[in-house]
């Protein structure tokens, strides 16, 4: 069973998906770093078996083919796109798990309802050039999610053309957010944040956005059964350059899903599982029409993301000065990241990002620093240094 949810009543749908996940996930995916070539290899058997339809949607700036995959024969169309930022692969993993679920569980009620009532339009890994380097931007150095209006990149044009051609009623814009974001003013990490993007600066609701809020309420209720207290709302400022806002404005009821963080889950395998369950349950609700009865307050009442978390907080470290500067005791907040250019993810870099009274901040790990002394002159805030080196300093 999932962490943190033992005392929460779960629906039959959620119980079924939790129980089936380990049998249906793509076991080949063991790291969040993978290329388009690997993804295509995992998808090919389902294409060959005609579980999936596939068509070329266009080419990336570096001439990688970007494909549109289809599943189901229903009249309601749902567009799902992932990894428009190349270093945000969690939902791509979950989409592959979902397709594997359809392949293995052909007679399951969820599969039958989705197959009969929906047509899924999937563009996993919309930014394959960025995924190749595990970087956010395209090979032209553009943040594609700020190119919905200018449409300067070929990848942005592919997404716009797909939406315009098929006019899907629903859309899911799938991303990863900073894994250190927290739920409102709390110290609790945001496992997943949801957003129904605004369609204008006044955040006006129309039929399109109101429908999306009900779908987001379904997703939120599912997550509350799995990770209560770890679900937040993403910033809802309007930006017409952003695809979620634009697709909403173009008439597709869109939900943004931001995969966050979890303790000891650098590769986001637990967050991948949450995506799988939340996404499938939401699609099932659209397929059956159950979402129409939902109260949007389950989404609207979510607190916004905050940032009250470090990877490591070392409490009460002695900071020593020279030339008469007095010593003090203070907490030290540290973040730890992978080095992008290291494909094996074995090299970690760390930054000391804050010093002082950090009692209002949480951390994935906390240590007692009462036996640690640091010289003021040895500390450079926000400077990236090898994690191994900083660990030696903290002993």
Image: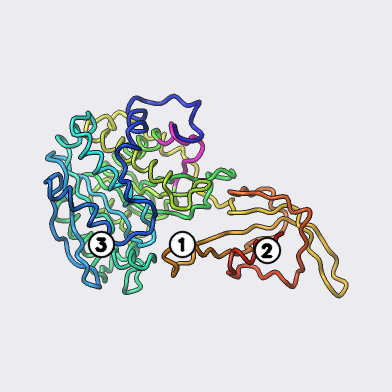
**How many numbered marks, from 0 up?**
3
Cα–Cα span, label 3 and label 1: 19 Å
Figure check: 151 above or below 253: below
State how far apart marks 3 and 2 are (Cα).
Answer: 39 Å
Which residue is tagged 1?
Answer: 345
Residue 335 visible? The answer is yes
Residue at 58%, 69% in the rendered image:
384
Q: Quadrant of residue 342?
A: bottom left
Q: Quadrant of the C terminus?
A: bottom right
Q: Nearer the viewer, residue 154 or 152?
A: 154
The earlier-in-sequence mark between 2 and 1 is: 1
- Residue 347 on image: x %, y %: 51, 65
Residue 291 is a magenta residue: no
Looking at the image, residue 112 sits to the left or right of residue 390; the answer is: left
**Residue that badge 3 annotates:** 37
Q: Nearer the viewer, residue 395 or 177?
A: 395
Tell whether label 1 touches label 3 (CB within 8 Å). Answer: no
Q: Secondary structure at mark 3?
A: helix
Q: Is residue 226 magenta?
A: yes
The region drawn magenta spans 223-233
- Give me the residue at 28% from left, 48% from top: 96
Quadrant in the rendering for residue 1: top left
In this rendered view, identify the residue nearer to me: 142 or 64.
64
Mark sitting on residue 392 = 2
Horizontal and vertical percent position of residue 394: 70, 60
Q: Are marks 3 and 2 in contact (CB under 8 Å)?
A: no
Q: Earlier in the sequence, mark 3 or mark 2?
A: 3
- In the image, is 69 to the left or to the right of 273? left
């Amino acid at each position: 069973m999932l962490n943190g949810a033992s005392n929460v009543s779960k629906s039959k749908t959620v119980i079924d998906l939790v129980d089936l996940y380990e049998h249906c996930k793509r076991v080949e995916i063991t790291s969040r770093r993978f290329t388009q070539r690997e993804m295509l290899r995992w998808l090919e058997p389902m294409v060959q078996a005609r579980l999936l339809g596939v068509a070329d949607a266009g080419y990336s700036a570096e001439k990688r083919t970007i494909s549109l995959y289809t599943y189901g024969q229903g009249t309601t169309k749902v567009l799902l796109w992932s990894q428009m930022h190349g270093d945000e692969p969690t939902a791509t993993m979950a989409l592959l798990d979902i397709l594997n679920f359809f392949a293995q569980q052909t007679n399951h009620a969820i599969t039958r309802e989705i197959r009969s009532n929906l047509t899924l339009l999937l563009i996993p890994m919309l930014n394959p050039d960025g995924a190749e380097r595990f970087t956010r931007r395209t090979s032209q150095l553009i943040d594609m999610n700020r190119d919905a209006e200018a449409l300067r990149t070929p990848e942005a044009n592919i997404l716009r053309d797909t939406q315009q051609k098929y006019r899907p009623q629903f859309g899911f814009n799938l991303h990863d957010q900073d894994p250190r974001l927290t739920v409102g003013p709390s110290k609790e990490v945001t496992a997943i944040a949801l957003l129904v993007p605004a369609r204008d600066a006044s955040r006006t609701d129309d039929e399109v956005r109101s429908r999306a809020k009900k779908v987001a309420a379904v997703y939120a209720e599912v997550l509350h059964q799995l990770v209560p207290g770890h679900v937040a709302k993403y910033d809802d400022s309007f930006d017409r350059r952003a695809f979620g806002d634009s697709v909403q404005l173009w008439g597709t009821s869109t939900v943004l899903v931001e995969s966050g963080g979890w303790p000891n889950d650098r590769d986001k395998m637990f967050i991948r599982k949450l995506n799988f369950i939340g996404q499938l349950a939401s699609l099932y609700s659209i397929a059956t029409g159950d979402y129409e009865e939902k109260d949007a307050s389950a989404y609207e009442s979510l607190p916004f993301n905050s940032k009250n978390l470090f990877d490591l907080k070392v409490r009460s470290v002695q900071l020593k000065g020279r030339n008469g500067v007095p010593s003090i005791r203070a907490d030290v907040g540290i973040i730890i990241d992978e080095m992008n250019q290291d494909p094996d993810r074995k090299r970690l870099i760390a930054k000391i990002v804050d010093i002082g009274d950090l009692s209002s901040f949480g951390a994935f790990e906390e240590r007692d620093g009462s036996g640690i002394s640091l010289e003021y002159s040895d500390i450079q805030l926000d400077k990236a240094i090898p994690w191994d080196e900083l660990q030696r300093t903290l002993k």
